Amino acid sequence: MHSRETVTLALRLSAQGLSDRHIAARCGVSVSSLRRWRASTDRALEQPRRSTCPRCHGQPLDLPSYAHLLGLYLGDGHIVRCRRAVYQLAVQCDDAWPGLIEETAQVMARVMPQSAVSRRRRRGCTEVKSYSKHWPCLFPQHGPGLKHQRPITLEGWQQEIVDAHPGLFVRGLMHSDGYRGVNRVRHGERCYAYPRYLFRNESRDILALCGRALDVLGVAWRHNKRNELSVARREAVALLDLHVGPKH
């Protein structure tokens, strides 16, 4: 008799597409047991299930958390199709910011509360992920290839959410693909230091979405480089601190 934790791990690895022999060796189970568990799960999936998708089934959606997660996804997230038409949403977080890892997991769980959230350690980062058949419903920007190689536009219902919660959307973008740091400038013998925000992304569309949200917040910004925008004025940084703040 195997523990529930072993069965859950084996089925999760199977959903990721790993071979039965690899899973059996990793979990210390037989291939026949794995196939029996999977068949039982498949039969259960054929039964009518409780509606779970805010878009397909009209379930309530945590709008502030969605705006936050959308920013995280556009900054450093991706969606992958797994077995049985199940999709994995994953956001990579630098291990230097444990608070960001925990915050990402909490936001992901609030957006899709019926789906468990897990963490996977990689070199220098932690991948926060969740499985659901309906992640593409909530993130229609999902598609083949890198984000900067295809158009990224928000649908009307997404833009309404972002316009209602621009601070959380920018927080997701800044904490995934940006940062708050100190800029030092020397004029002759004098050195000046001031805080600023930078957001870097190769997608011009995502940069434009960030700029629009900053405009809604009333935060002054400018293009610092081709693939980067900057918030550096003292009053603008102070205003953005109310919504974003440094990573932790």
Image (cartoon, rainbow, N blue to C red):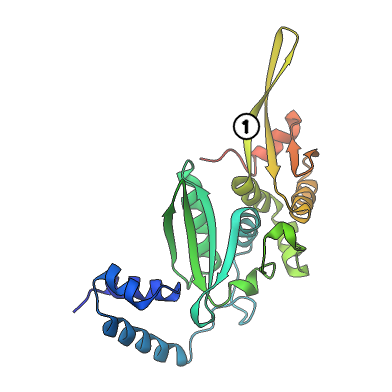
Q: Position of residue 68 (x, y in %)?
A: 62, 56
Q: How many marks?
A: 1
Instruction: Identify the residue shown where x is 64% and y is 70%.
Output: 138
Instruction: Identify the residue shown where x is 44% and y is 75%.
Output: 15
Is residue 220 visible in the rendered image? The answer is no
For residue 26, side relative to residue 225 (left or right):
left
For residue 43, side relative to residue 3 (left or right):
right
Q: Nearer the viewer, residue 11 or 44?
A: 11
Residue type, mark 1 in image: Gly
Is residue 230 visible in the rendered image? The answer is yes
Q: Could you tell me which secondary element the residue under label 1 belongs to?
A: strand
Instruction: Identify the residue shown where x is 27% and y is 83%.
Output: 33
- On the image, which quarter does residue 154 sit in? bottom right
Mark 1 sits on what residue? Answer: 181
* In the depicted structure, whether residue 33 falls above or below residue 206: below
For residue 209, side relative to residue 53 (left or right):
right
